[in-house]
DNA sequence: TTGTAAGCGTTATCAA
DNA sequence: TTGATAACGCTTACAA
C-alpha cells in the first residue's frame, strides 16, 4: 500500500494525505478524518525509504559495541536509548566483536547515510581515520577514545580511577601490589597502568615492570595472569585488575591455590559489571557512570547532527570505587 | 557527492557510473577505470536510501534481544551475523529491554521497510499479533515462540532438557528436589516446569506445588526464591533453576546459610552462560546450541525473504546437560 | 558499449 | 484548504 493508493481511495491528492499523516499544514477536519479512516482501514504505513530519501533523515543512530556483551555496555545503551528516543531517534546496535571487517560494514551504514549518526563504544580505527570520519559524519566516542583523536567523547578519568584504587590498597597496608592488565593496548589500559604506577611511586612502595602482567582480556587471561603472579618469586598480597572479568579469572586461580580472596589476598576489578556483585565473594570494583555516559554521548552526538562543525568536546564523568568482599577494610 | 556529479566529472552518464560501481552490464575497461578513478578521488559512496528505494531492498536484518545482555544471546548473534553476512545482509540489533513500547518502535522498522526481515529472540507480542505480522513481513522466532503462533522458529526441546536435568538429580540419589522458575510465564518456563514435574512423577519421587517457586528472572529472584525454599519445612537437597542467573542467586544464598553447593545441595542452571563456568564453584547447566540456533534462524528467515508464502517450519535443535561443580557425581 | 529517461514512495513548493 | 508536480539519489529498461 502506498500513499497514492490511499489518496485515490480517499478521493484527495497525495499531498493532502501526506499533510494529514504528518500533521503538517492545513487540512480540513472532514478531509482529515476521511483520510485517516482509509489509512486505518488499509493499515497504511508510510515507506521509510521514500521518506528518508526526501527528507535526508533516517531517524536512526548507530551504536557500536565490542565483543563483551555485559551489563557495563547495557547500562550505557539504556542511557543512549533514553536520550535518543527523547530526540525522536531509534538506536540500532552494531555488535562489532572487535573485528575491523565487521566494524567497517557498520561504518558503511554511516557513509551511505543509512543512519544519521554514530556512537562508538569502541573502535578498530586509529586516531586519524576516526578524525577524518568525524569531519564528514556525526560521530562521537564513549568510554574509550584513541589517543590524539580530535573527536567528541565522554569517558572517565582512567588514570585517576586506577590511582585511587591502588592508593586504597596501599592505605590498608599492602606494599606488594601487582596489576593484571589487558594485552590489547588501548587508551584506558595505558591510563590505568599509569595510574597504578604513579600511585606506587607516590606512596613509596615502588613497582617492578614484572608487577604488571598483560594477558587476554577475559576470564582465562585473568586466571593465567594470576597464576604467573602467584608463582613468581615475590607473590603480591593485592592485585588491581584491568576489568572485572579478569578479576573473576584471578579469583578463580586464588581459590584453586587454597587462598581466600579478601583475606589472604585483596582484589579490585574495574567496571562494576553485574558479576562483581553476584560473585561470591562479591568483588570490589571501580564503577563508571554508565547511564550518564550514554546520556552525555547522545547529547554530544545531537550537537554534531545539528552542526557538524560544532566544537569538539571531551567530557570527563566521575568514577566511584566500590568496596566489597574481595578487599579487607 | 552524488552519482550525477561523478558522471559529469568522468564525462559519462549516470547509468555508466552505476553499472561500473555495481559491476553490472558491459562497461569498457577504459571507461571503467576513468570512473573508478573519480570515485576514489572524491570518496564517492552511493546513497543507500536512493538505492533502497529503487531496489526495494535495504540489506538489513533486524534482530531483537531482551534485556539480558549475556553470553547466551551473544553466541546466537554470532551465528546470525555469520549467516546473514554470507547472504549479503547486515544485522542490526534491537535491545528491546522486554518493553512493548520499545519493541513496537523496532517493529515499525519492519513495517516501514527499513529492514528486510526480523529475527525475534523474544517478543511481547501474543501468538495472534505475531502471526499477523509474519503474514506480511519476513519474520522468524528463535529460542522462545509463543504457544500456538504459526511462525517459523528454532528452539530446543525445553521439556526434554528439563526432564533430563531432573532425571540426573534423581539418579544421583535426590528425592527432595525443587525448581526455581521465572514468574514471567512463557513457553520455555511452562515447558521446563512440565519437564520437572514429569521427571518427578516418572521416577516416583513426586512433587508438591510448593516445590516450584516463581520469582523474578534475575539474580535477586534466584536468591529470594532459594531463601524461601531453604526455610520451608522440608528444604530440598537439589534445585533445578530456570536460568543460570537465578542459579547464581540461589548459590549465593546457599553460601550465606553456611552450606556448600555441590556438597550439601546440588544445583543445575540453564543456558550455560559464561558465568556458569566462571563461577566458583562452576555451575552445572543445560547448554543450548546458540551458534547453530543463530545459523538456523537466519536460514529460516532467508526462506521467508525469498518467498513470504513458503511453509512455516519449526526446528528443534539438541541441548546438552553439562555437569560441573554444583552437582556431585 | 553507452546514454536517456522512467520510476521507486515520499515531502514540499507553488499555484489555484 | 487543496492539488499538481518537482525533487530526493539511485537502478534499469530501452534506445541509440
Image: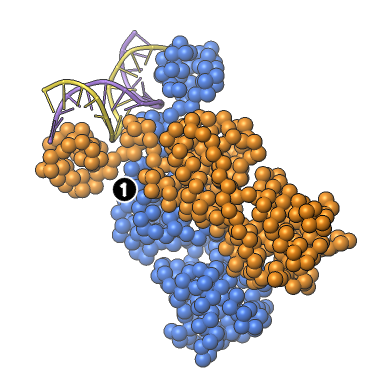
Chain colours: A blue, B orange, C purple, D yellow
Does residue A314 show up? no
Disc 1: which chain? A
Q: For residue A275, which quarter of the picture?
A: bottom right
The residue positioned 77% from the left and 51% from the top of the image is B197
Q: Where is residue B41 drawn, in percent x and y?
A: 19, 48
Observer-nearest of B220 and A16: B220
Task: Give the SS element for disc 1.
Answer: helix
Q: If the image is split into quadrants, where does the N terminus of chain A sit?
A: top left
Observer-nearest of A99 and A273: A99
Q: Which residue is mark 1?
A: A136
Q: Where is residue A10 drawn, in percent x and y?
A: 48, 13
Q: Where is residue A150 drawn, in percent x and y?
A: 35, 58
The residue positioned 17% from the left and 37% from the top of the image is B26
The residue positioned 47% from the left and 45% from the top of the image is B298
The residue positioned 70% from the left and 68% from the top of the image is B327
Above or below, comparing residue A154 to residue A212 in the picture: above
Observer-nearest of B151 and A235: B151
Q: List the single residue furthest toward the bottom.
A: A233
Q: If the image is split into quadrants, where does the C terminus of chain A sit?
A: bottom right
Amino acid at each position: 500500500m502506498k500513499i497514492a493508493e490511499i489518496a485515490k481511495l480517499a478521493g484527495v491528492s497525495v499531498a493532502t494525505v501526506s499533510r494529514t499523516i504528518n500533521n503538517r499544514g492545513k487540512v480540513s477536519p472532514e478531509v482529515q478524518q476521511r483520510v485517516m479512516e482509509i489509512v486505518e482501514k488499509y493499515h497504511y504505513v508510510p515507506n521509510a525509504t521514500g521518506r528518508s530519501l526526501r527528507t535526508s533523515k533516517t531517524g536512526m543512530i548507530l551504536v557500536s559495541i565490542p565483543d563483551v556483551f555485559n551489563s557495563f555496555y547495557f547500562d550505557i545503551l539504556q542511557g543512549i536509548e533514553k536520550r535518543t528516543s527523547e530526540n525522536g531517534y531509534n538506536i540500532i546496535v552494531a555488535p562489532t566483536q572487535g573485528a575491523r571487517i565487521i566494524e567497517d560494514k557498520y561504518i558503511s551504514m554511516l557513509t551511505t547515510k543509512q543512519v544519521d549518526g554514530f556512537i562508538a563504544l569502541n573502535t578498530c580505527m586509529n586516531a586519524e581515520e576516526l578524525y577524518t570520519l568525524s569531519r564528514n559524519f556525526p560521530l562521537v566516542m564513549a568510554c574509550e577514545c584513541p589517543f590524539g583523536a580530535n573527536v567528541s567523547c565522554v569517558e572517565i578519568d582512567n588514570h585517576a580511577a586506577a590511582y585511587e584504587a591502588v592508593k586504597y590498597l596501599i592505605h590498608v597496608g599492602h606494599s606488594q601490589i601487582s596489576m593484571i592488565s589487558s594485552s590489547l593496548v588501548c587508551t584506558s589500559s595505558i591510563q590505568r597502568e599509569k595510574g597504578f604506577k604513579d600511585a606506587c611511586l607516590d606512596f613509596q612502595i615502588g613497582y617492578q615492570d614484572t608487577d604488571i602482567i598483560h594477558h587476554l582480556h577475559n576470564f582465562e587471561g585473568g586466571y593465567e595472569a594470576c597464576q604467573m603472579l602467584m608463582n613468581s618469586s615475590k607473590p603480591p598480597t593485592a592485585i588491581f585488575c584491568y576489568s572485572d572479568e579478569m578479576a573473576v579469572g584471578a579469583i578463580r586461580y586464588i581459590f584453586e591455590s587454597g587462598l581466600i580472596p579478601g583475606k589472604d589476598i585483596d582484589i579490585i576489578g574495574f567496571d562494576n559489571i553485574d558479576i562483581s556483585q553476584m560473585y561470591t565473594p562479591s568483588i570490589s570494583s571501580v564503577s563508571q557512570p554508565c547511564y550518564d555516559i550514554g546520556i552525555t554521548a547522545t547529547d554530544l552526538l545531537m550537537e554534531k547532527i545539528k552542526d557538524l562543525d560544532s566544537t569538539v568536546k571531551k567530557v570527563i564523568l566521575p568514577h566511584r570505587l566500590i568496596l566489597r568482599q574481595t578487599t579487607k577494610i
